[in-house]
Image (cartoon, rainbow, N blue to C red):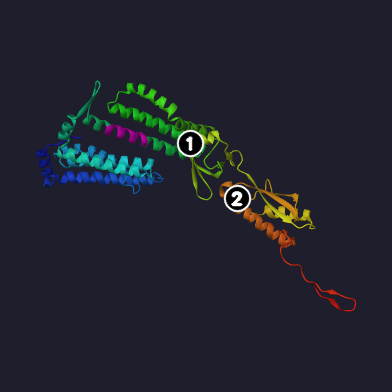
Amino acid sequence: MHQPLSLNELQALLGRAFSATALGEWALLLGCLLLAGLVTVILSRVKERRGLSVLFGERVVDGALFPLLAVGLALAARPLLKVWGLAPAVFKLVLPLLVSLAVIRLVARVLAAAWPSSTVIKAVERLGSWLIWIGAVLWVTGLWPVMMDELDDIGWKFGNVHLTLRNLIEGGSTAALVLVVALWISSAIEAQLLRRESLDLSMRKIAANAIRSLLLFVGLLFAMSAAGIDLTALGVLGGALGVGLGFGLQKLAANYVSGFVILAERSLRIGDMVKVDNFEGRVTDIKTRYTVIRSLGGKEAIVPNELLITQRVENSSLADPRVLLSTVVQVAYGCDVEAVMGRLTATVAEVPRVLSAPGPAVQLSQFAADGLELTIYFWIMDPENGSGGVRSDVNLAILRTLQGLGVDIPYPQRVVHQAGLPPAKVDIPQPDGARTPPA
């Protein structure tokens, strides 16, 4: 990248850039942009994209690959100007803008891929874009060295260390760029791991989380070193952090450790049907700090991982996804109960979602006051689809079978006596035909 220009040089450069002698340079720059767009489109069709891509974005040319290719092609084509005997003018103006666009696109797409629905990240993205564009304008106009000299005069002294505002801005920018690159690499590795169907999903999650944590930690060390922070001071900071974790952050640390234990032991896996603290649902995601459980009614519970380690958890899918369900019906005394039990067994076996091995079973469970109580047991393989629908289908099949056999389903009958009414008046007939008047 060339050095920033003074105001007089900028005026002269603008005059040359928009003169007739710069038409060849404009044509070369336009060719670089068209070639970058063409290569981006071809690569987007060759590579299968899933969702929002860092390189290709949503509409291919709005990703980070197009400006990165444009910068590379422009730098490669710039020596051709000397061969043609042209003094670079357009390239000096456009290259800083292309570099700024590439940085903005890269930062924006990485943050959007890592936190797709965060409003804070979107605000940070807009703020960073404005700062980068302002820096590019200051660089092109030649005001960048003046501003840096002014910022270099503003400083603070901490012991033997002297920090200036310029050091903080340069170090912060370098640190942010290093962290974005580390986050991009970790997101790409995580996406590749999650797409590998040969490995268990829980193992893929723990590998992805471990790689992301390691890369972010290494990136943070490089960023702090680039910002001018002495890494030997981290020993004292690490001791203080350990004390803080031991006292104030022990719950948070326990949740993170429990998350890795759950993923490593595979006691809970994504897709399992579980019941935790009277909340039943399917595990949709396992984070390092919490686990998301979605009920069949659409509600989601965020359960701290420590709770899943220290409390009882009912897992319907850990070793065997088959689940036993039951329903109860009464039939009238006097019916051929053995024949009814056989017909009910065959009827329930024909209901969709009911397994044939092990098949349904009907048991005479109780001699009730109003009839014979039959309990029908049946197995299903997909508890994540709920049990209410299949139980309703089984009950409807039982009702149709009993109606077809002419078997009554008894219901309790009661005689109600109402207190406080006068006794009924009854005429008592006499032998001579006379009636005794009622009392």
Residue at left offset 50%, top offset 38%: 201
Residue indicated by mark 2: 387
Residue at left offset 76%, top offset 67%: 423
Query: Bounds of the magenta span?
Result: 172-183
In this view, the residue farthest toward the right is 431
Residue 152: x and y, percent? 18, 29
* 395 to the left or right of 118: right
The CA span between labels 1 and 2 is 30 Å
Res. 204 mark: 1
Residue 87: x and y, percent? 13, 39
Q: Residues within 10 Å of mark 1 (few under 14, many from 20)?
A: many
Mark 1 lies on a secondary structure that is helix
Residue 120: x and y, percent? 34, 42
Labels 1 and 2: the sequence-earlier one: 1
Q: Quadrant of residue 32?
A: top left
Residue at left offset 27%, top offset 45%: 35
Quadrant of the image containing the N terminus: top left
